[in-house]
Image (spheres, rainbow, N blue to C red):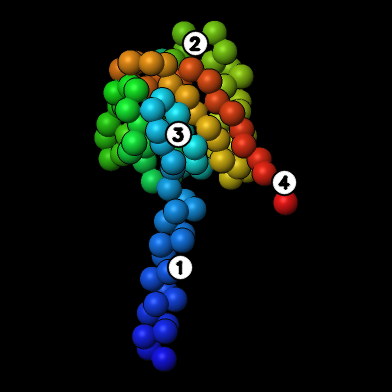
Amino acid sequence: MKILGRTFLWAALVWAGSVWSADCEGLRCYGSISMLDVESGGTVYVGLAGGIAGLTGCTPNSGAESFFTLLPSNPNNAQIYSLLLTAASTGIPVAIVADNASTGCTIHYVNLIRTVN
């Protein structure tokens, strides 16, 4: 019985890790927002649950984890931030695409991904 319980716990942890971790490839990451940091100058740093490992088309900002950057100079800054805030408050996953070869993985666009069952 103990082996069955441990096996179930291990399987549940592996499944939960795959559900909560961001899925990244090239310039795109898909996942749930874990952090929004708004700086006084208007720059917004966006973290995804599980980090953004696998993102290869840009150089992310780093700290405790890696982040995307939304610059105040982005012409759609308000719309993108609104979408990010909606996703963060509702728990709906997003797909974030960064500008190619950008330092800080500056956000090019964001999609809110809601699946209907």
Point out the tag, 3 or 2, that comes first from the N-terminus.
Answer: 3
Residue 109 visible in rendering: yes
Q: Is mark 1 on a helix, strand or loop?
A: helix
Say what amino acid the circle numbered 1 marks.
Answer: Ala
Residue 43, labelled with which disc? none
Q: Distance between the residues labelled 1 and 4?
A: 24 Å
- Residue designated by label 2: 74
Where is 4 relative to 78, above or below? below
Q: In which quarter of the image is residue 107?
A: top left
Q: Where is residue 4 in the image (x, y as percent from the top left)?
A: 42, 84
Q: Please tell me whether mark 3 sits on a helix, a strand or a loop.
A: strand
Q: In which quarter of the view is residue 80 placed?
A: top right
What number of labels is visible? Answer: 4
Whether residue 82 sits left or right of residue 96 in the image: it is right
Element assignment for label 4: loop
User: In the rendered structure, which disc, 1 or 4, sits on the residue that comes first in sequence?
Assistant: 1
Nearest the eye: 30 or 89:
30
Which numbered circle lies on residue 116? Answer: 4
From the image, tell me which residue sits under label 1. 12
Between 17 and 37, the one nearer to me in the picture? 17
- In 3D space, how far apart are the residues under numbered discs 3 and 1 (Cα atoms)? 24 Å
| CB within 8 Å, label 3 to label 2 | no
Observer-nearest of 117 and 69: 117
Mark 3, residue position: 29
Camera-near label (3 vs 2) is 3
Q: Residue at x 53, y 20 (%)?
A: 109
Which amino acid type is shown beneath numbered disc 2?
A: Asn
